[in-house]
Amino acid sequence: MSPADLRTDPHAASSLAPQQDVLVEENVSLRLLLAQAAIDAKSLLTAAGIDARERVAADKLQRVILEELHHRIKNTIATVGAIVSQSLSNLEGVEHAQHAIAGRLLALGRAHDLLLQARWSSADLGTVVRGATEAFNNPDEPKFSISGPGIRMTSGAVVAIAMTLNELCTNTTKFGALSVPQGRIDISWTLLDQPTQRLHLIWSEKNGPAVHPPERRSFGTRLIETLGRQLRGDVRLSYEPTGFVYILDVPLASLTS
């Protein structure tokens, strides 16, 4: 049918109009579908880019974690080796050596337990102090007075402080305040306001037997001093008439960063 026929045949023109409407609707629908497909494609490409970046970041993080874990394992093995070799030196009999080694390894294990709970990121100084002294305390008649502000410490500082406190606790049960029923120990720490903030921690024994400077520096003493130096701090051991005193003065940055 020609256009002229459509003009002369109104019935034919009216029958074609619905078909044109359908074509227009389909055309509009197709355009909408294409537009939506373009949007979806752009979204998928964007998501793919984000996924790729996240995957790269995750791979990098995994490598860092594995390297750090490897480093920590090596440090732990070295620490255990030093504990064993130094504990065996200058000791009479296997039993004394076994107790010395077992105590220090337990302290190392407790420090790692704290770090595991904190996912090896940090731990609070008060939590570390209470955890290190718990095995030597008496809940029915507390032997320790512990006070100080909250300070989040890095993993290296946690191990150093926990090991130091274990040495102090072991020593005081043998020769110091905790070797007698009435003995008590005060542990306190403060932050000194200076251009570079420093932590000032004091372990002070009282009501114990008279103490005297040892004739020779034991492994425990050397360990305490070494751990303090690892934190770039100053360690002072004082044998006062009232009891033994340990003082650690250390830059706060050495504990927190």
Image (tube, grey):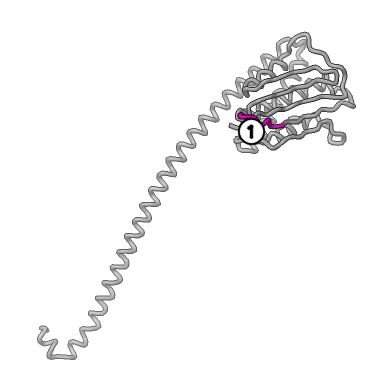
For the point 51% across and 32% down, the residue is: 66
**20 displayed left or right of 203:** left
- Which corner quadrant holds the C terminus? top right
**73 displayed left or right of 88:** left
Q: Give the percent coordinates (x, y) of residue 213.
A: 79, 12
Q: Residues within 10 Å of mark 1 (few under 14, many from 20)?
A: many
For the point 78% across and 8% down, the residue is: 215
Mark 1 lies on residue: 153
Q: Quadrant of residue 123?
A: top right
Rendered position, 48 above or below 103: below
SS for dot 1: strand
Q: Provide the residue span drawn in magenta.
A: 190-196
Q: Give the percent coordinates (x, y) of residue 228.
A: 66, 21
**112 displayed left or right of 61:** right
Q: Give the percent coordinates (x, y) of residue 223.
A: 69, 18
Q: Is 192 covered by the magenta stretch?
A: yes
- Which corner quadrant holds the N terminus? bottom left
For the point 71% across and 32% down, the residue is: 190
Q: Quadrant of residue 39?
A: bottom left
For the point 38% across and 48% down, the residue is: 49
Q: Quadrant of residue 155?
A: top right
- Which amino acid does the dot numbered 1 rest on? Met
Q: Give the percent coordinates (x, y) of residue 120.
A: 60, 35
